[in-house]
Image (cartoon, rainbow, N blue to C red):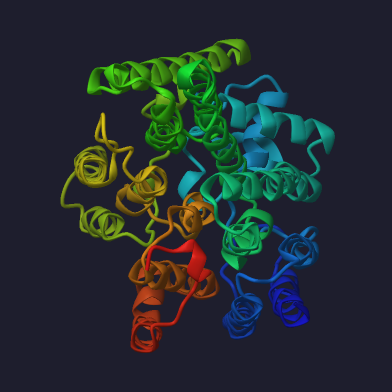
Amino acid sequence: MLAGLAGILLVATATTLDTDGLLEVGAEPWRALVTLPGHALLLWAWWKLGPRWRRPRLTAALWSLPMLLVPPMHSRDAYSYAAQGWLLRHGHDPYTVPSGDADLPGLLVGVHWFETTSVYPPLSLKVFEWVTRLTDSDLYWTAIAMRVPNVLALVAMAVLLPMLARRARIPSSTVLWAGLSNPLILVQWVGGIHNDAVMVALIAWAFLAAHDAAWRGWRGMLLGGALIGIAMSVKQSAALAGLGVVALAWSAAAPHLPLHLRTWWGLARRAVAAGVVAIAAFAVIAWVTGLGLGWRNPTAGSPLEATSNTPISWVASFARFHELLPEETIVTVLTGVSFGLVLAAVVVLVLRAGPRPPTSAGRPWLVASGSLLAFAVLGPALQPWYLTWVVPFVALARPRLLWQHAWLLAVVLAGVIPALQDVMAPYAAMALLAFPGWLLWRRLRRDATPVLERSATTV
């Protein structure tokens, strides 16, 4: 545990010392020489603790402490949050006014988003405004205080994950080790200050609610749908978790239903009801906040405007740089390609692991985690923190050893790549990690290294 603390202290110290004011400047090369070993040490310490470690909550708290007051790590998203909060506080609409126009906070917005309006749904914007009011728009403290909702989300996950583990009959220590004290979660949610943390905590709550078999399972389905709608008001990608809610709620309800109600029509009715409730909750929040659906404006930033870890974004960057097509055409075409890939992956997932009334409930946790993974990996952008949508729930799906190894490899690579991306393009960082990643994969497969508890897998 102390080795992990030393690792995160290295990362936090290097990030602080290499901050030239708060403006966007490139990291000095020496920073990666410090932060890369720091992240590696943190990952090694987490791995050595293992899924039987009995103090994962204490570990998560201890490793989070050094990150609480340092500038945002490996990302400038927190400064965008601060700028949009400033706009709302001063009576401007972040859906029509570019983030870069937010007086002094606007100077801190990343270059890709300086001239774009907000892509975040209403509840996120209200949280940004509340934090900005709390800190009186102070440039430093506003960004730091954006960590408060994420820390609360971590606390919520510390409560929710053991409850989900009991439902899935998996040791809670395994789930907490894999999904709470995981360095990828802590660095991206606390250090990177990404609002994905709040979204994932709400998704976890929705998954827990879905297990409620009262009212012949309708209560869990409807409450889970409502929570997904609230999560969508934080980040729209939560919509994919709705498939997981339906699968989990049906799995909980089916054993208590008479055979004549365990039909495809019965499942479809419940799924539609959950979807309607989710959309209604999302719409009510948009109406109550008075912000509406402005995140759909054509002036809003697109994930394809920044190069990320997905080949789709590389194609977009290449086409944009060489002016092969107009910017709007590039974004429209590649967004459509991404949507098609996600849809195809979700259809395959549901066909292979979804419920099959009246005899089988399928593998609901595989549907829940797989649908989120499909959007994270095949969407128009892929950032390391997108994997945090899935990481907390993987152990609950009881993955086979092959997929345990794939999950661990993804955690390790996503855990160290931010240090490299501070000083080089994402595709260069991925190329640099390709050979070490292959060596790790080969070692895991050769030794059949167990990642999770044997009792928590289907091996």
> Looking at the image, can residue 311 be seen?
yes
314 left or right of 155? left
What residue do we see at 40% from left, 83% from top? 444
Tell me where residue 136 appears, x and y as whole percent.
83, 35
The single residue placed furthest to the left in the displayed view is 324
Q: Estimate the x, y position of residue 323 in percent, counting from the top left.
A: 20, 52
Q: Is residue 395 above or below residue 350?
A: below
Asked whether 96 or 378 is in front, the reply is 378
- Residues 304 and 101: in front is 304
258 horizontally vs 69: left or right: left
Q: Position of residue 408 (x, y in %)?
A: 46, 71
User: Residue at position x 70%, y 67% from top?
Assistant: 20
Q: Nearer the viewer, residue 442 or 132?
A: 442
User: Is 447 above or below relative to 315?
Assistant: below
Q: Is residue 45 left or right of residue 333?
A: right
Look at 78% across and 51% down and name the residue there: 140
Residue at position x 71%, y 64% in the image: 56
| Viewport quadrant of the N terminus | bottom right
Q: Is residue 292 visible?
A: no
For the view shown, which residue lies furthest in the front direction? Answer: 258
Q: How many marks?
A: 0
Q: Position of residue 335 (x, y in %)?
A: 26, 41
Asked if residue 455 is positioned above or below residue 270 in the image, the reply reads below
- Quarter occupied by the C terminus: bottom left
